[in-house]
Image (spheres, rainbow, N blue to C red):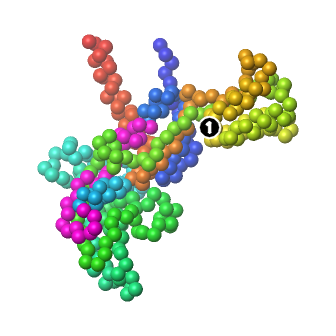
Amino acid sequence: MSKQREPKIEILSIFPHEIKFILSETDVSVANTLRRIMIAEVPTLAIDLVEYHENTTVLNDEYIAHRLGLIPIKYLDPNTMRGGDCHGAFVPHRECQCFDRCPRCSVEFMLDVDFDKVAADRAENERDLPLTVTSADLQSNNEHVIPAHFLNSEEQDEAHDTGISIVKIGPGQHLKLKAVARMGISKEHAKWCPVAAATYRFWPEITVNDEACSTLTHEQKQQLIDVCPDRILELDEVSGKIIVAENAWELATFTEDLKVLQSTMKKREEDEDFVTVEHSQNKFIFCVEGTGAMDAEDILMSSLNVLSITLTNLRPEIENLREI
């Protein structure tokens, strides 16, 4: 019987919009499964239906509806008041028992912007300038569900608008609509994807063969260090030995330059390498960036929860196969 693995997660950095962590004591199949769940199976809210009352803007109904669907919708957890997992607060529209829609399966947003009415309150020299309709103009009927206008405070400080741009309108133009947000997953449509990027890379296992390196001159050692474009090696000023850079795990790009140079320095082809850089098969560095719909930490926790539920449901199916 194979030894049961116990995967571990070590947080490197964590922000509302981004999280970096190390996943270890597992293999690439689990790492890729976790990444794919983050992308495609973590439930979020997104605008799925738009009812127009009036649209005299330059964009047609379908174009605006598409732009509305791609606005990240954030569910504020009542306990933490941050972008959290909406799975417990809402049910999928198709599974709800209501006739059309209800607060359990949907959230309604009203948008009503009339250029002429807004222009009357603007400065005289600005009355004819185009007006940008943004996500800030969407009014929710649920205090815990709001559009994610910006990814972070830095983006908000640099922005020229009050939120995500939807359309620009001019004199005589009016946009009035009702948008309905529902819960879904990215497997159905990309608008429900909670991540802008979810990537992992292999942890670099860098080994310096001190015995072999002792046969090299100072110039040759410096050549080995300089040939690495990612600067993963350093020369110890005291001992004169080649050592691994402190942040080599973050810099390593697994280029072939080092291997090619070493082959020219060996006396025999079968001699051991001076420095080896290999992919770890049980340790991975993850970087996850959110869209604003959920905090990065909650994306990770939700994906682990989805994985746990999936495996729990899979177990009885496997047991049934054994009985056949």
183 relative to 306 in the view: left or right: left
* Rendered position, 319 above or below 93: above
Badge 1: few (under 14), some or many (20 or more) residues near its Cα, within 10 Å? some
Which percent across, then down, holds residue 138? Answer: 31, 65
Say whether residue 54 is left or right of residue 67. Answer: left
Residue at 21% x, 42% y is 95
Task: Give x and y (percent) for residue 262.
Answer: 74, 27
Residue 174 is inside the magenta segment = no
Q: Residue furthest front?
A: 264
Where on the picture, by quarter, is residue 279? top right
For residue 280, what is the image quadrant? top right
Q: Nearer the viewer, residue 88 or 119?
A: 119
Is 46 in the magenta?
Answer: yes
Q: Is residue 96 above or below residue 128?
A: above
Image location of residue 143, percent across then percent down: 32, 61
In this picture, is 115 found above or below 301?
A: below
Q: Quadrant of the C terminus?
A: top left
Secondary structure at badge 1 equals loop
In this view, 215 is above or below 222? above
Q: Position of residue 33 (x, y in %)?
A: 43, 33
Q: Is residue 259 left or right of residue 305?
A: right
Q: Residue at x 54, y 36 (%)?
A: 201
* Residue shown at 40% from the left, 65% from the top: 163
Residue at image mark 1:
253
**In the visual, does 63 lie left or right of 7?**
left
> Which residue is outermost to the bottom?
124
Range of residues picked out in magenta: 35-60
Identified by mark 1, the residue type is Thr
User: What residue is at 39 percent from the left and 48 percent from the top?
Assistant: 194
Can residue 253 be seen at all in this image of the molecule? yes
Residue 51 falls in image quadrant:
bottom left
Q: Answer whether residue 249 is visible to the viewer in this image.
A: no
